[in-house]
Image: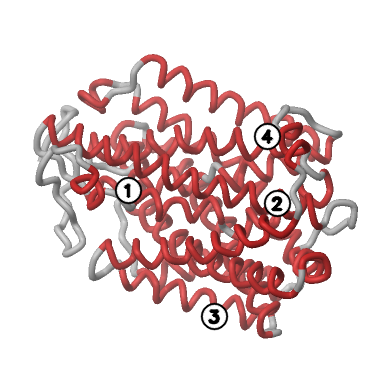
Amino acid sequence: MFQTKPFAAPPRRRTPGDTDVIAPQSRPGRLWPLMGPAFVTAVAYVDPGNFATNITAGSTYGYLLVWVIVVSNVMAMLIQYLSAKAGVATGMSLPALCRAHLPRPVVRGLWAQAELVAIATDLAEVVGGALALKLLFDLPLLVGGTITAVVAFALLGLKRTTHRHFEFVITGLLGVILVGFVYDVAISGVDQMAVLDGTLPRFAGADSILIAAGMLGATVMPHAIYLHGGLTAERYRPRSEDERRSVMRSQRIDVVTAMTIAGFMNLSLLLVAAAALSGQGIDTIEGAHAGLGDSLGQASALLFAIGLLASGFASSSVGTLSGQIVMEGFLRRRIPVTLRRLVTLLPALAVIALGVDPTTALVGSQVVLSFGIPFALVPLIWFTRRSDVMGSLVNRRVTTVAGALVAAVIIALNVVLLAQLV
C-alpha cells in the first residue's frame, strides 16, 4: 500500500468486496469495474428530503428555483470528486483524516455535529419510506417507518459479501426512481421557456431563500461527503502512480455520470411540481401524490409513490453506512450495525410517534443538513490542497479556488437562512 503522508494509514482488513487496481489501461472495459461508489453516494442526492423540498419549491414558486438545482448539482460534482480523490490518495475517509490532523477537541466537535447530521438524515429517509408505504398500502406511519428501517438493514447485509451486490441493488433502486420521473416529465407538459427563465439566479422573498437552503441541504449532503471518501478508501488500493491515475480516471467518470443522473431526477421532480401542481398551494407529499393523480392520472401518482419508497429504502441503508464511517473515522470505534441503526432510527420514529407533520419534518431536516455542510466541506478542501496529505493527487490551484468559492456560497446562504429563522 502506498503512502502520501509521513504517517501510515490505519491497517484495514481485506474483505471479499475489496477491489485492487490491476492495470492502468483507460479503455471503458477496464474502467467499468472501478466504478460504483458514486452511484451509492448519489442516493443521498435523491432521498425523500429532495422530494419534499423540490415539491414545495415547484408547487409554490413554479420554475423560479430551477437554478438552485442546477448550481447545487455542479457543486455536488466537484465536492464528490474531491471526496473520492481524498480516499484514493490517502486510504482514509474524511473523518479519519480529521482525527489524524486536527486537535482532539475539534475532532470531538466535528463528530458531535456529524451525529446530529446523521439523525437529521435518517429522519428524512425513514419518514419518506413511511409516507410511501402509507400512500401505497395505507399503513400507519410508525409501522411504515419500522419496515423502512428493517429493509435498510437487510440491504446493508449485502455489503458483507461483496461491494458489487450492494452497489447493484442501490443502482437498481435509483433506476426505479428514474423511470417514474421520466414518465411524469413526459406527460406533465413542462414549459421549456419557463425552465430556461428559471436558470436565472434570483429569489422571491424570504420564504424562497428558506426553501433554497433546504434544496441545497437536500442536494449537497454532509453524509455523502463523508461516505464517498470512505468507500473509495476501502475499495481501491493503488500500488503505483499509473494505478492512481487509472483509478482517478474511473472516479471522474463515475462521479459525473452518477451526479448527472441524480441532478436530472431532482430537476424532473421540481419541473413536474411546477407544471402539474403550481398554484395549487400544495406543500405536502400526500398533497403532491393526490395532485399528481388528479392532474396526470393514477399511473403518475403510483410511480411517484413507488419512487419515494425506493428512495426511502436505498437512502436509509446508505445513511447508516455513512454513520459507521463517521464513528470509525472520528472515534476509531466500531459498533454493531444494529446498534448504529438504533442510534439514528429512534429519534426518527419518535418524531413520527409524536405526530409531527411528515413533510414539515422532511423540509426541516434538510435545513439542518444545510448547516452541516461547511463542517464537512471546509476540512475536505483544506486536506485536498495539501501535498503532504495528497501526494501527487493534490489539488491544482484552480480546483482549490473553485472549492473555496463553493464553500463560501454555501456558508453565506446558511448565514442568510439563520438570520431569516431568527
Reading the image, the residue beneath label 4 is: 67
Say few, some or many: other residues with alpha carbon within 10 Å of mark 1 (under 14 / 14 to 19 / 20 or more): many
List x then y, in percent, for residue 279: 90, 52
Amino acid carrying mark 4 in the image: Trp
Which residue sits furthest top?
397
Say few, some or many: other residues with alpha carbon within 10 Å of mark 2 (under 14 / 14 to 19 / 20 or more): many
Dividing the image into 4 quarters, which one contains the C terminus? top right
Image-quadrant location for residue 82: top left
Q: Identify the mark nearer the N-term, 3 or 1.
A: 3
Question: Disc 4 and disc 2: Cα gap in Å?
Answer: 14 Å
Reading the image, the residue beneath label 1 is: 230
Secondary structure type for disc 1: helix
| Picture disc at residue 12 | none
Question: Disc 4 and disc 3: Cα gap in Å?
Answer: 36 Å
Say few, some or many: other residues with alpha carbon within 10 Å of mark 4 (under 14 / 14 to 19 / 20 or more): many
Q: Is residue 241 left or right of residue 414?
A: left
| Picture disc at residue 53 | 2
Mark yes or no: residue 99 visible: no
Amino acid carrying mark 3 in the image: Ile
Q: Nearer the viewer, residue 252 or 194?
A: 194
CB atoms at circles 2 and 1 under 8 Å apart?
no
List x then y, in percent, for residue 262: 52, 49
Residue under the point 78% across and 38% down: 194
Label 2 or label 1, whichever lies nearer to me, is 2
Question: Disc 1 and disc 4: Cα gap in Å?
Answer: 30 Å
Q: Identify the mark nearer the N-term, 4 or 3.
A: 4
Secondary structure type for disc 4: helix
